[in-house]
Image (cartoon, rainbow, N blue to C red):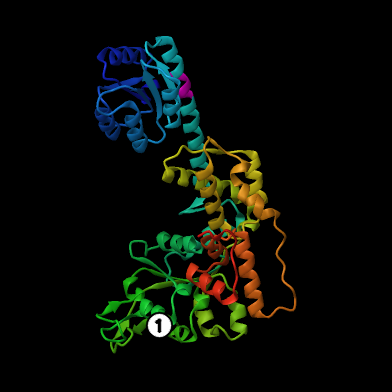
Amino acid sequence: MKKRWKILIVDDEEIMQQSLSAWLTKDGYTVDTASSGDEAVQKAREHHYAIYFIDLNMPQMGGLQTMHEIRLLNPHASIIVVTGYPTVATAIKAIKQGAQEYIVKPCNPQDISLLVSRLIKVKSLERENLILRQRLLRQYRFQDIVSKNPRMHAIFQLIREIASIRSTVLIEGESGTGKELIARAIHYSGDRANHPFIGVPCAALTETLLESELFGHEKGSFTGAAGQRKGKFELAGGGTLFLDEIGDISPKLQIDLLRVLQERRFYRVGGSEEIGVDVRVIAATNLDLEDAVRQGKFRDDLYYRLNVINIRIPPVRERREDIPLLADHFIEKLSNEFGKGIPEIDNGALKLLMDYDWPGNVRELENALERALIACHGGVLTEQDFSFLKRSMSKRPFALAANLNLREVEKEVIAAAIERAGGNIKEAARILGIDRSTLYERLKRYGISRPGQQE
């Protein structure tokens, strides 16, 4: 059993290599040796070692530099620094740079055995915990979506049923609920999975740009059109075209899109050749399109053409049982991206996450965990690491006066989002579900100032 745990001894003294190797091999571990930092880094590239013994004082690449290079290759390795010239300063420096232990030559075989045994026990527990986490996530995972909520599982089942048919799908849900993830799950669960999945952010483009983006253009069709360009409908041929925030497209584009959905044919901008296309369209919106139809802002015939299959994603506050699962999923994902060990989340922090309403939904939860992980320096995420959420929860509840016109309502909502985000434009734009350039324009229009001036 111990043989699965590989250990590398890095020391320029052959006698030290031989001694440590003999003791640890006798204890049942698989042991390799390296005579220099360069050799150790090369071996770390070729093999996975659970534990490294690294001599602090070596010629050329010293122990601390060796440790740094190994950390880049294997962030989860346990590193034991060994030195014959101990000082408090070097010990502190080694620990700060990621060493688990600091031992002094000559080494005692019994102490070495106890130390390695203790580190292996910790690693075994970490591995078991990771396996349990992965097993739990697999149980509640569909494609890249994690949930144990019955409404979400009904959506998963619907996705399986519709994945290989060509009917259009309308996905509705608040900003940050994961509408694009649902669209991708539909695409990659069906027979179009080997063909392109192309997304278009409809709200981020002007009418002219969006028309060219969707349908392409011919050379000379407008100023700057230096050559022919295929649009997203052509590029997504055989696959899926995802139209995000479909409720924001102009009346003209609504007509153009309706024609493509009905006839499966279109013209490039400035073109005279009709182009046939085989594309499945999935649209998404955070607006109430049915209400937009009643108000005459969205064509009813296009709405019915898009809404052949409807998927409504519940917000996070309506599926709080998913918060621990999502937290585990994002902690593991982000820890791997940052090259950190995977921390636990204590009960106080988990209660705070469960009590928070998550107006920005899954996207806001991921952002909060990323912020907390960056600030966390231990192996446990605590309530203190999420203090920024406590500040948000303590702010007065947002309410609108009944006599405001639409312009005043928009101003109030934007001001509230800016306040909640502490002046952070990127975060406020996420909360509002708009891009930063649109938010900047609204701030200028309404003369809204932002505290902290953070970008």
Query: Can see residue 175?
Result: yes
Q: Which quadrant is home to the N terminus?
A: top left
Query: Can see residue 278?
Result: no
* Magenta-colored stretch includes residue 261: no
Residue 271 lies, in percent from the top left, at 29, 87
Residue 111 lies, in percent from the top left, at 44, 12
The prevailing secondary structure element of the residues shown in magenta is: helix
The residue wearing badge 1 is 208
Amino acid marked by disc 1: Thr
Is 22 above or below relative to 364? above
Which residues fall within the magenta stretch? 116-121
Which residue is at 65% across, 49% downward? 354
Is 347 above or below relative to 403? above
Is 376 above or below relative to 420? above
Q: Front-most of 220 and 36?
A: 36
- Crowd tier of the residue under label 1, counting other residues whose Cα lies within 10 Å: few below 14, some 14–19, many 20 or above: few
Q: Front-most of 281 and 209?
A: 209
The residue tagged with tag 1: helix, strand or loop?
helix
Is 161 above or below relative to 46? below
Residue 449 lies, in percent from the top left, at 59, 67
Q: Front-most of 410 and 316?
A: 410
Residue 338 lies, in percent from the top left, at 43, 44
Question: In the displayed structure, does residue 186 sit left or right of residue 58?
Answer: right
